[in-house]
Image (tube, rainbow, N blue to C red):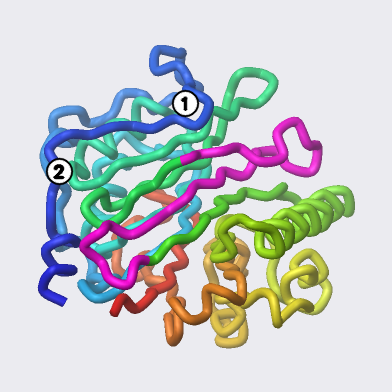
Amino acid sequence: MNGLRRHKAAKVAALWILCAGCPSRTTQQSSSHSRVEGRASQVSARTDVVDAVGAPDSLDIATWNIQNFPSQSSTPQFVADLIASMALDFVAVQEIGDVQAFDALMKRLPGFKSVLSSHRYRDGSFQKLGVIYRASLLDVHSPTLLFRRDYDFPRPPLLVSVRTDRGISPRVDFLAINVHLKAGQRSRDFGRRKRAAEKLERYMRRQVDGPGEDDIVLLGDINQTLAEFDGQVLAPFVERSRRYTVRTRRLFRARRKSHLYTRRLIDHIITTSSFREEIQDGETVIPKLNEDVANYLERVSDHLPVVIRIPLR
């Protein structure tokens, strides 16, 4: 594993922001927190803020809703410190409300690259989806927005193709679909989430049954639990256990929470059955950042990251 450790520890000097649909970099921001702590964000992120979740011999993938990012001017700096400290390799993020602040976060992570959605709401504001990934370990390409202009998806899912660097053997290739489904507790909100899940499952089934990549990771803020009634939203995946594994099911049974205000598990990771060989005994965890970080709710988010650790041989 020495070669892998070198890959995961390597730093790249150049930063490139890849954009799905090429959003303008000079557009006026929708967030009131565009004044970020500039000078502090130019230095490399700290790695001692919290205990590591990832390891040198695993591919560590997370989904993280960073509520209305950034909540404070120091949030970009602090989120970068948390990503580096947790030793994550691939982070699917939701609710990016300020591109300038996102750029500040990335400048503090010189060994990482990113992809950011081009989506905007009708009024010009946005809560973008994005991915942040370790450039020395992963190659991420072909970003695509799925179900654009579909009422059931207030934010189009962001699909990217991912593969491990040539230094990793055997190489791991997969598609990652980052989602942020409709929030709210009204029956019409529930209906939109349910129809969205059905459409996502059909899309993934066509991929698996067709000539395309059949290793797929669906991850993000589903805004729904796995409880008996709420679970109807994820039924297309739960009821097709031969095709899919809901990686957060064990966390739900253990009564773990990803959303701090409602104390519910609404952020999920789902993989296709063909990915089982690569994942094997991969563990899914929720770091207790709210216990380890002072004022986490105010400084970062009302969501905790959900992480799956995939062993690399």
Q: Quadrant of the N terminus?
A: bottom left
In the rendered view, does 190 fall on the left or right side of 52?
Answer: right
Q: Report the residue marked by disc 2.
A: 12
Secondary structure at numbered mark 2: loop
In the rendered view, does 148 fall on the left or right side of 78?
Answer: right
Pick whichever, 6 or 127, lies toward us: 6
Q: Report the residue marked by disc 1.
A: 31
Q: Magenta stretch: give its range.
A: 142-171
Pick whichever, 231 or 282, lies toward us: 282
Q: Quadrant of the C terminus?
A: bottom left
Give how far across and how far down residue 310 sits, in percent.
Answer: 38, 75
Q: Nearer the viewer, mark 1 or mark 2?
A: 2
Tally the marks: 2
Whether 166 is among the magenta residues is yes
Identified at 45% across, 84% down, the residue is 280
Whether 57 is among the magenta residues is no
